[in-house]
Image (tube, helix red, strand yellow):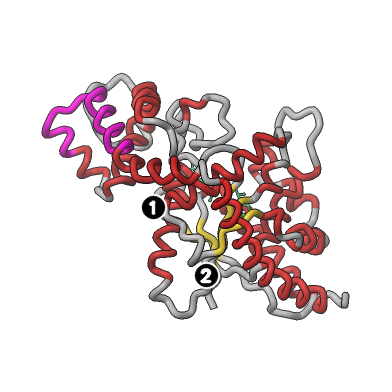
Amino acid sequence: DKQIFSGIQPTSIPHLGNYFGAIKQWVDMQNSLSKDQDTRPMIISIVDLHAITLPKDPRILNDYIYKCAATLVSCGIDPERNILYQQSQVAYHGQLSWILGCKVTMPQLGRMHQFKFKSDGLAEVPLGLYTYPVLQAADILLYRATHVPVGEDQLQHLELCRTIADKFNNTYSTNYFPSPIPLQGEFTRLKSLRDPSKKMSKSDADSNSRIELVDPPEIIEKKIKKAVTDSERLISYKPDKRPGLSTLIDLECAVTGQLPEEVAERCMLQAIDKSEYKKHVSKLLIEHLAPIQAKYKKLINDKKLLDDILDDGAKKANKIAEKNFHDICKIIGSR
Ligand code: TYM
C-alpha cells in the first residue's frame, strides 16, 4: 500500500519555495488520492522538534506552529481527509529515532550538506543538528511511508533514510520498513530573490530574499521590485546566464502552468522590459495568493479550531504510530 508522508519546520511562515516545492504537491496529491483506492490518508507533520535544533524562542516557536498549521489548511490541506499534526505530540518519533540512531554511523551523518552548511562557523554545534536526519528518518519510517514529496534540498536526507531502513531490515532479517522514495514536483528548487546562487530559504537573514505566503500585496510588489536581475533590458529565459530574471519567469510559470519559453517569447514580441515584467509577476502572485490569504486571515484568529485540528491529527497519528512502534520493538527483541 502507498503511504505518503511529508514534513515542514515551523521556523517561519512558509514561503513560495515551500509552496511550489512541496505544499502544492501535497494539495494536488490529496485531490487525486480519493480516486486511488490503495492509498491511505496522507500524513503531514509540523516538525517542531526539528525546529529546535538551532536556538528558538519558545513564544516564537509556539506562534509559528499555529501559523504553519493555518497556512497549510489555507493552501488546501484538508485536515479531515489527511492527518495533519504536530510532531512532538507523537512521542514515538523520539523513541524510534533512538533505535534508528543505532543503525547509522557518524561519518554518514557528517556527510550531510545541510549539517555542514548549518554547523559551519558555529562555536558550539548542538548534537541535535547532527542527528537531525535520524529524526527525519524516524518521522518517515514510523508510518512505514513509501512516498515522500519534498523539494530538492531534502534528497540527501531521503537517501540516508533509505540507507537506514535497509540497514535495519538487513540486521533483523525483515522487510518491515519500505524504502521510501522522494516525489518531486516541477519546481524543486526555487531560488532566492536576492542571490540566485542560493535557494529561497526561511533562514536567510534578508527577508527580501523570500516571499512568504501571507505577505501583503505591497510587500510582494516591493520584494519583486528589489529582486536581483541583470543589466539587459528585455526578457529572455536563460537560467544559467540570467538566473535572477529566469527565477521570475519560473514564478510566472509556477502560477500559470505555461512554459518558460512561451513566456519569454510573448514578452519579446511585446517588447516588455524588466520593470514592466516585474509588475506583471507581482500581480500574478498577488492574485494567486489572495484566496489563500483570505482563508488564513480567518483561521489564524481561531486558535480553538487550530487546536482541534492538531489534536485530532495527533490522535490519528498516534494510533498508527503506537501499533507500528510496538511491532518494531518486537522485531528488535524488546517486548
Ligand atoms: P523545510 O521546512 O525546510 O521545507 C519544507 C519543504 O519545502 C521544500 N523547500 C523548497 N522547495 C523548493 N525550493 C525551495 N527554495 C525550497 N525550500 C524548501 C523542502 O524541500 C521541503 O520539502 N527536513 C525537512 C522537514 C522534515 C521532513 C521530514 C520532510 C522533517 N521530517 C520527513 C519530509 C519527511 C525540512 O527542513 O523542510
Residue 227 seen in render: no
Q: Which residues are magenta?
A: 265-286
Magenta-colored stretch includes residue 282: yes
> Residue at position x 33%, y 34% from top?
248
The residue singled out by tag 1 in the image is 186
The 10 Å Cα crowd at callout 2, few under 14, some 14 to 19, many 20 or more, is some
- Under tag 2, what secondary structure? loop
- Tell me the quarter of the picture where residue 144 sits: bottom right
Measured from the top left, where is residue 250 in percent x and y?
A: 34, 41
Q: With respect to residue 87, does 200 lie above or below?
A: above
| Viewer-proximal residue among 64 and 242 | 64
The residue singled out by tag 2 in the image is 41
> Residue at position x 24%, y 32% from top?
280
| Viewer-proximal residue among 96 and 231 | 96
> Residue at position x 65%, y 34% from top?
60
Residue behind label 2 places its C-beta within 8 angstroms of ligand 1? no
Q: What is the distance, in whole Å, between disc 1 and disc 2 at their CAs?
A: 23 Å
Q: Earlier in the sequence, mark 1 or mark 2?
A: 2
Q: How many marks?
A: 2
- Under tag 1, what secondary structure? loop
Magenta-colored stretch includes residue 226: no
Q: Is residue 241 left or right of residue 104?
A: left
Q: Is residue 71 left or right of residue 46?
A: left
Q: Quadrant of the C terminus?
A: bottom right
User: Mark 1 belongs to which amino acid?
Assistant: Glu
